[in-house]
Image (cartoon, rainbow, N blue to C red):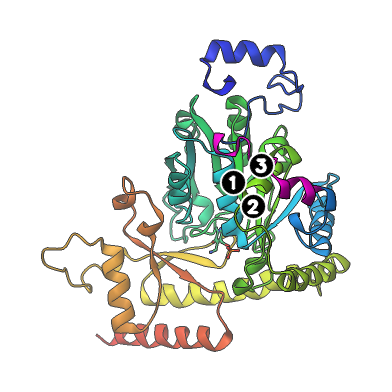
Amino acid sequence: MLRRAGPSLRHFLLERKSSAGYSLCSREAKMSRPVQARRLEGIDKNIWVEFVKLAATYSKGHPPLVTALAQLFEKVLGRELDPMTNVMVTVGAYQALFCCFQAFVDEGDEVIIIEPFFDCYEPMVKMAGGTPVFVPLRPKAPKDGKLMSSADWQLDPAELASKFSERTKAIVLNSPNNPLGKVFSRGELEVIAELCVKHDVLCISDEVYEWLVYDGRENTRIASLPGMWDRTVIIGSAGKTFSATGWKVGWTVGPDRLLRHLRTVHQNSVYHCATIAQEAVAQGFQRELALFGKPESYFVQLPRALQQKRDLLIQSLVAVGMKPVVPEGTYFLVADISEFKSDVPEVPNSDEPYDYRFTKWMMKNKGLAAIPLSAFYSEAHKNNYTNFIRFCFAKEEATLKAANDILQKWKKEKTSS
Ligand code: PMP
């Protein structure tokens, strides 16, 4: 198989161009090797696939929804999209991720995951028989007196490059990133894209927080960079886009040559997503398409409202002595809690990390909830990141006010003690 061949043979074959016309050396740097996992062999042509193809209706999604998604992503990506072949609706972004790993990852394939990461990537890669290869975003100390920003957490390009090998099948990119709120800059994405093209690697781009970007920041899509459309699956979620997590409507956008394999997994597992939820999301998108870029658009209003909530939470956390990392996107905020070590009792005979102990202590003694950041790291790296916790600020006014009151009270207690 082409993808198992040694570097010289592979290079030679790629130079010659495959019969499908894909070549690493072509200007578009299209993918040359088979993308689908071996588990899909022979199951892409069952009776349902064949006749559903003929019927060409609900299998890839409710027509009004795939049509609206195609129209929206045409605007965002600046390329024509076919709603039936370039879009597939899933049961939340979770199912979209699951379809990607099952469709592309074989036993022994490596998948690069950038840390900190949304926790399901690691088990999903393993369930597909793959090996996760982790590379951390490394925090740089903030300039004097300034709060750290999620932009200060960066990949070391040389370290990232060292993780790509003959065995690398895909990289998972999550921008804006959960838990940090980091929005990868165009320059950072170009480094990742160049490595994907050079090593003929797929990009699973989890963009569920795509509309939640603050301070007028640009959100570059990796699929729009040279050579990337052909090797990228974009993943989105109505749960995040319309603040309706329970509806479990997600989607994938990408080239047919990748999505056809996702359809095989989808048709042989979930098969269909609840039409009523798809219709509701379609109506949301139709409204957004009509208002695209206008102040009344939800995509404009939601980040504006969340940015205010973010700024309020930052102020309150600073007041009690935490050091928030200002997120450029998402509705999560990571805060440095190293100042509190003397407040949190050690647990005898326990190797529980400090961020876990702190979070439990805070929940019990202050009534404030968070998640320890080290939960978003691999086993090998989690001990290096135990001084942070993650808050969520996508809360109703009353809940945020209650959290703010708790923090005000905490501040008073600190100043009076
Ligand atoms: N990706 C990321 C980064 C997420 O944070 C989440 C939800 N927390 C998902 C995917 C899953 O989204 P959904 O609820 O649409 O399944």
Q: Nearer the viewer, mark 1 or mark 2?
A: 2
Find residue 36 and report its horizontal and vertical position in percent.
61, 35
> Mark 1 or mark 3, which is nearer the start of the sequence?
1
Q: Residue at the location (24% across, 67% down)? A: 341
* Residue situated furthest left in the rendering: 349
Question: Percent position (x, y) of residue 310?
Answer: 55, 72
Which label was assigned to residue 100? 1
Picture coordinates of residue 396, whole percent (x, y): 57, 83
> Seen in the image, is 77 located left or right of residue 184?
right
* Residue span colored magenta: 38-53
The reply to whether the C-beta atoms of the residues labelled 2 and 3 are less than 8 Å apart is: no
Total marks shown come to: 3
Spatial CA distance of label 1 from label 2 is: 10 Å
**Lower position in the chain sequence, tag 2 or tag 3:** 3
Question: Dot 2 lies on which element?
Answer: helix
Q: Quadrant of residue 22 in the image?
A: top right
Q: CA distance from mark 3 to mark 1?
A: 8 Å
Q: Which residue is mark 3?
A: 261
Image x and y of residue 378, in percent:
37, 49
Residue tagged 2: 266
Question: Pointers 3 and 1 in contact (CB under 8 A)?
Answer: no
- CB of residue at label 2: within 8 Å of ligand 1? no
